[in-house]
Image (cartoon, helix red, strand yellow):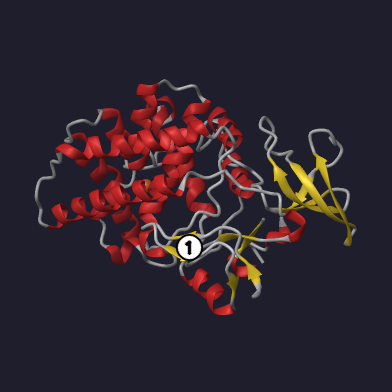
Amino acid sequence: MRLVSTKSLKENTYLAKPIINDSGQVLLKQGVLLSSRMIQRLIDLGITFVYIQDKLTEDIESTEGIAAKVRVEATNTIKSEFNQICKDIKLQKSFHNDHLGQNFSKVIRSILAEVKGNPKAISLLSDVYLYDSYIFTHSLNVTIYTLALAIKLKYNEKQLMEIGLGAILHDVGKMAIPTKILNKPGRLDPEEFSIIKTHAQVGYEILKKQPNLSLLTAHCAFQHHERINGSGYPRGIKGDEIHPYAKIIGICDVFDAVTCNRVYRKAMLPHEAIELLYSGVGTLYDKDLVEAFAKSIALYPVGITVGLSDGREGIVLKQNKELSTRPIIRVISENNQQVEPYDLDLMKQVNVTITSCEAVLANE
Ligand SMILES: [Fe+2]
């Protein structure tokens, strides 16, 4: 299978993985022959990448995300709890929910089991996501990235639960923001942006009152937009004043935001998003955290097409666990000439580097 952007899809291509929406409904079955109408629908739904069948890469399998069942259950919990909070805010009810902490703890435990059970670098690129539920999918993706990074940092069970809950609830304060502003395509004006910024404090106020939730979890919502040089919000705190949980969630938040297609801009690929994070090392983010994050995600996800420095082109076959910049490649062409496919381990070919991902056409 091969990973391609929906915007570069051609008709008469076979889908290699089913498209399931976040309610667990199968939108398109595995093996379906894509028509131009179906392709347009995928784009309209906000789906950025899909896996397609391809003769040269029939044996490539992607297992970098989390099980569809866990994803659907988690999204359902996020949806129903967040919507309840939204209603209570509108009714100006003081929000107090005995089950919130318990329900989310259950979700975090199942996501944690998935992430632990899959030691591979994480890629969520081909997981479906729909515009009208961006916040739910985003909350889940940030949780998966956060837990993968926290595991890499050898956090203990208690810490994993605290940071996992902090991640899944980091944007809960957005339930108090008018949807007109929240879903506005394009740039926000200064007034709208100052309204958006209130979500950090509002989230903290909601979470700190909840039984079964640690105060640290509430601080994740409060501090996830703070940056180490003090340029963040709401308080502009710096360096060690920011809790490590919030620093981690902040990094995962930015990464997920820029690798998803939004109405007003196209998605970045993982290696580009990591470059963006690296450009903020020392000013916005801690170096060790960005480095650990780069190791926990798939920089070049399985199935993605890459160009090599010596003129060869291929498809990522497998990750090299310790060095995500040097995966194993199925070479399919040399200097634009198709060749009999063969595999190349970039760990063993240190003079060759990946120079492009252009064939994915994510940014055409
Ligand atoms: Fe946020």
Residue farthest bottom in this picture: 37
Which amino acid, mark 1? Arg
For residue 218, which quarter of the picture?
top left
Whether 172 is drawn above or below 345: the answer is: below
Image-based side of 241 in relation to 344, left or right: left
Badge 1 residue CB within 8 Å of ligand 1: no
Residue located 56% across and 27% down the image: 288
Whether 80 is drawn above or below 241: the answer is: below
Front residue (pair 246, 62): 62
Residue located 42% across and 60% down the image: 21
The x, y position of residue 17, in whole percent, is 56, 58
Location of the C terminus (image quadrant): bottom right
Would you name the residue on which mark 1 appears? 262
Exactly how many numbered labels are in the figure?
1
Image-based side of 248 in relation to 2, left or right: left
Residue located 36% across and 54% down the image: 135
Q: Dot 1, how many residues are within 10 Å of its Cα: few (below 14), some (14-19), or many (20+)?
A: some
Location of the N terminus (image quadrant): bottom right
Q: Is residue 9 visible?
A: no
Front residue (pair 29, 310): 29
Image-based side of 306 in relation to 267, left or right: right
Residue located 51% across and 69% down the image: 42
For residue 33, which quarter of the picture?
bottom right
- Secondary element under disc 1, as helix, strand or loop, is loop
Q: Is residue 267 visible?
A: yes
The x, y position of residue 145, in whole percent, is 48, 39
Front residue (pair 360, 355): 360
The x, y position of residue 49, in whole percent, is 57, 60
